Amino acid sequence: MKWIVLAAGLFLFFNGMMSRTFSYTSPPRHCWVMDYIHLNGCFANPAGPQIVVWGATLLGAALIAAGFLASRRERR
């Protein structure tokens, strides 16, 4: 189970770090793209893409830390 958590964490962290955000002026749209998995979307406000990108990155980091802590607990 810890390997699945670690793999999911690395996947989310890597895709969050390699994401791009950009905006259009007419009509006003704020978009994000995860290039490696071809996932994208647009929002009406500028906070939306930042929440998606930072959320994936931070969730991935949390899963990596959880996998690391679980492996340390198993060693004891």
Image (cartoon, rainbow, N blue to C red):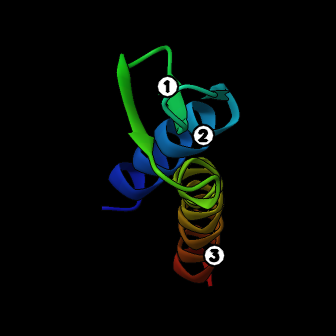
Q: Residue at x 49, y 25 (%)?
A: 34
Q: Nearer the viewer, mark 2 or mark 3?
A: 2
Q: Earlier in the sequence, mark 2 or mark 1?
A: 2
- At x 47%, y 14%, the residue is 36
Q: Position of residue 37 (x, y in %)?
A: 37, 19
Residue 61, image x, y percentages: 66, 59
Distance CA(mark 2)–CA(mark 3): 22 Å
Which quadrant, please, contains the N terminus?
bottom left
Image position of 32 (left or right of 22): left
Query: On residue 69, which mark appears?
Result: 3
Residues tagged 2 and 1 counted as in contact (Cβ below 8 A): yes
Mark 3 vs 1, N-terminal side: 1
Disc 2: CA contacts within 10 A as few (<14), some (14-19) or many (>=20): many
Distance from Cα at disc 2 to Cα at disc 1: 7 Å
* Quadrant (top left, top right, bottom left, bottom right) of the C terminus: bottom right
Question: How many residues crowd around disc 1 within 10 Å: few (fewer than 14), some, or many (20 or more)?
Answer: some
Q: Residues within 10 Å of mark 3 (few under 14, many from 20)?
A: few
Circle number at residue 34 = 1
Q: Amino acid at mark 2?
A: Gly
N-term mark: 2 or 3: 2
Q: Which residue is mark 2?
A: 16
Q: Which image quarter: residue 20?
A: top right
Badge 1 amino acid: Met
What residue is shown at x 42% (from left), y 38% (from top)? Answer: 42
Q: Is residue 59 left or right of residue 5?
A: right
Q: Nearer the viewer, residue 21 or 54?
A: 21
Q: Helix or strand or loop: what does disc 1 sit on?
A: strand
